[in-house]
Structure formats: C-alpha cells, structure tokens
Amino acid sequence: MKKILFAASECVPFIKTGGLADVVGSLPKYFDKNEYDVRVIMPKYLCIKEELRNKMNYINHFYTDFYWRNQYVGILEMEYEGIHFYFIDSEFYFSGPWPYSNMRDDIEKFSFFSKAVLSALPIIGFRPDIIHCHDWQTGLIPVYLNDSFQGNPFFHGIKTIFTIHNLKFQGVWDIQTIRNITGLSDYYFTNDKLEAYQNGNLLKGGLVYADKITTVSKSYAEEIQTQFYGENLDGLLRAKSNNLLGILNGIDYNFYNPKTDEDIDYTYDTDNVFQAKRRNKLALQKKLGLNCDENAFMIGIVSRLTGQKGFDLVECVMEQICSEDVQLVILGTGESRFEELFSYYARKYPNRVSANIYYSESLSHQIYAGSDAFLMPSLFEPCGLSQLMSLRYGTLPIVRETGGLRDTVIPYNEYTGEGTGYSFANYNAHEMLHIINYAKETYFNHRDAWNKMVLRAMKQDFSWSSSAKEYEKLYDSLTEVK
C-alpha cells in the first residue's frame, strides 16, 4: 500500500477560491483504494463552515519555534466521502475571514503551515511515501524536508511532488524577510535555490527541491518552458524538463452530471438533451429577465473577471458580440473594469445581456445547462475546468488554443464533421469575434452539424479516473525500489 499525502491551502468542500480546491478535493477519491492510501492535509480556517468544523476530531497539539515565537499547532481530522483529512489549527494564522490576505502575511502564514505539516507527521501516525504539494503555499515543504527535518530518521526516504496549478502566483517577497520568517540559512538564498531576481520565491523552492514537478495539462507543461508563459522561471523549468510532466485535470462526473443535477430545472442525458436544453434556456431567460426565446444563441461565461481570462478581447468587440440574435449571460467577480463593462452592457441591452457580478454554484450549473456556447478566450489557461463542465452539459466551448483549453476542445471541422467546440489561435479580439460568428452561423444554419457536435461533447470523458491513473504511474515510479 503506497501512502500519499496531499498538502494544499484549499480543498472542497471545506474552502474554495479557485480550481485548486476542486482538484485537491476530488482527485483523491479516484485512486485505487487497494493500492493507494491518499490523504489530505490543509489549514483549519475559521472561515470554514461551522457544520464542517464541528465534525472535525481533535488529535493532539504541540508547540513549534517559528519566527521568534513558540507557536501553537493543533491537529484535527475527519473522514469525508471516504477520504481522510487532517487540519492544521492555529488561530493566530488561520482565523481571518478569507484564506488569503496580503502577500507578506500569506508568506508567513503558509511558511508556518509548511513547517507544521512536517512536524505533525510523527504525531498523526501517518508516514507518507510521497508528499504531493500543491502551488506556492506548500513550496517550502520540499525545502524544509531537505533541511531541518533530515536529521530525523522518520523523514528519510520521503519523496515530494510539486504541482503547479498557476505559475503566475509564486509567493515572492524580499530575501531578508523570508529568511527571518522561515529560519532558513543563507545557503538557500542563492540563484540556484530560493533566490529569483533579488527576491525570495517560495514556489521556486518547491520546484528546486521536489523530486518531480507536474502541472495540470500537457500543453501548459510545454508552454511554461517558454519565455512568454514562463513567468521568469522558464530557464529553471527547461533545466527540470526531465522531471516535469503535464497531467490533465478532470472534473467530478458525479457532481457535474446533467442527468442528476438538482440545481438545473430539467435534467437530461444524450437521449433528451435538445428538448431539455431548450427548456433550461427558457427557464434561465425567465429567471434573469432576458427575452424568452428558445431560438436565441445564448453564450455563457462563468469566470473570474480578470485579464488572464481574456476579457480585454471581449471588451474590444463587446458591441459586436451583443448583436440582435445573441444573448450573453455572465457570472463572476474580478477586476472592476470588467465588472463595470458587463454591468454597463446589461443596462444597455437588458433583454440580451445578464451580468451577475457575484458567484453562485447553482446558477453556474444553470448557465452550463441552458447556454448553447461557452466563451473562454484566455491569455493563458493551465488547465481550465469550465470548458470541461460545459462539454459535460452539451454546451459547446469557444476557446483560445492555449494550455488545457487546447488539450480538451477539438475544434469543429465542417469538412470532416469532427469537433467538440470552437477555437482560435492568436490572442486577437477580431479573430475571437470571427470564431464566435462562425459558431453562431453553424447554430442557425447547420443545426444538424451543431447537434451532432453536442452529442460528441457530452460523450467526452474528462472525469478524474484517467487522470488518477496517470498520477498512479507517477507515484509508482517514485516508490519502486531501484
């Protein structure tokens, strides 16, 4: 039995700010339970729902020297949907209203978490063969494992994997501050270790000291080795290329299932998809105050409203997108310029544009089920989950060919009849507009081809099962006796 410990700053159902939480919460359920004992450790935030916190059981506590303090560390556990979870408790660090705050405080908070994870292992009685670290918040775990914990025989032979969910976020601050916080010696603050461009970089520490590096799609693994996508770490990633691989994220097909989804008005599968999607569209139009027209071409957007997601392209051609025969439904929050953009057009075209500047899980499902197409024009996209959800619900993605979007959406070819959606290559607003219009033209004038594409989209398998098998191979390669 191979023992694996996932370490992460967030995880569904406890706390979620992005796709990282979905991965950490869903993936462990899909491993072969006879071969792999996969558990998860994360902070016990005070902002986790009380009903979940009340189900956590106290294991033990201890005190650790950290950043000039003798700091309390509590350990709790619970089992949820067959997975064993551990929680690091510290009211000093984890009592805020949100998991993250400013970068300086977050670096201190997650440096503490990284040290506490390793310190807790002998106490919980679970010695992992592999610690699987997720994003910069756990970047110091491989570093500490190489440093102060090496003197303890308990830790000898523990391997580490570091997964990059988004290379843009790295945990960067000045070297002196990070050195003081972490207690690491000057040895670690050179340009072949944690130093990067005169600053300390926690993510870089994870990349340097982990035994293997993964990221969340094959295309993103290639892209981050280039200067454009590499976020100033492309040289290191090229040097580490033999230990770097891309494993595509999946989604939970039990949760995202149009046949059983209680959040949508009319459930469906491939047998009744076209009738049910029309009815879901009408229900969504009525709910959002749009014109009730089952023939309108409805485009959905469920996203963080940021530049990374390509909304500056949308801003350039928003007037053209909002043509007479299109309805646009937006759900999400983000940068004020994009929130204001969509709100303005919702006021200008109240029958055709609905801007919902908040987040609602149930409304997101209704958008996946009721829309005809789903727009994701990202500048870069490590994997992307929304396009996988839209495929599952028979809503055809319109995406830019980058990262996981390129790996998961097969562009429509009217000559061969292939495809599960639409894509454009260059980061260009008019190229995006052209492909939106091409999708619209297929929808209105070649409905039979459109419907066949919907059925193909729904039959794609981007569940976690195939991804879990790839991770199992990786775990096996790290634990086999040479």
Image (cartoon, helix red, strand yellow):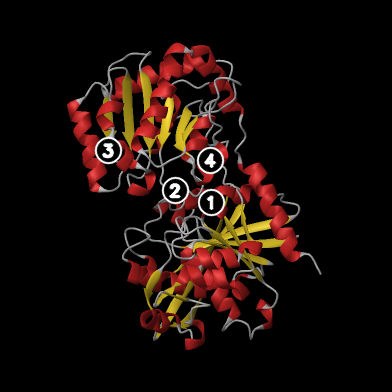
Dot 2: few (<14), some (14–19), or many (≥20) neighbours within 10 Å? many
Residue nearest the observer in this picture, 345 or 399:
399
Query: Mark 3: which amino acid?
Result: Glu
- Residue 174 at x, y = what percent? 36, 77
Residue nearest the observer in this picture, 39 or 340:
340
User: Residue, x 65% and y 63% (percent of image)?
Assistant: 243
Relative vertical location of residue 183 with respect to residue 78 in this rendering, above or below: below
User: Going by the image, does 299 lie left or right of 271?
Assistant: left
Q: Which mark is residue 406?
A: 4
Q: Which mark is residue 380?
A: 2
Dot 3: few (<14), some (14–19), or many (≥20) neighbours within 10 Å? some
User: Going by the image, does 107 lie left or right of 31?
Assistant: left
Identify the residue position indicated by label 1 in the image.
220
Q: Secondary structure at mark 1?
A: helix
Residue nearest the observer in this picture, 370 or 185:
185
Q: Secondary structure at mark 2?
A: loop
- Residue 304 at x, y = what percent? 36, 45
Query: Mark 4: which amino acid?
Result: Arg
Dot 4: few (<14), some (14–19), or many (≥20) neighbours within 10 Å? many
Asked which quadrant contains residue 196, the reply is bottom left
Identify the residue position indicated by label 3 in the image.
315
User: Residue, x 36% and y 30% (percent of image)?
Assistant: 433
Screen quadrant of the N terminus = bottom right
Whichever of callouts 2 and 4 sits on the residue coming sooner in the sequence is: 2
- Residue 310 at x, y = what percent? 36, 43
Is residue 229 visible in the rendered structure shown here? yes
Cβ atoms at labels 1 and 2 below 8 Å apart: yes
Disc 3 and disc 1: Cα gap in Å?
26 Å
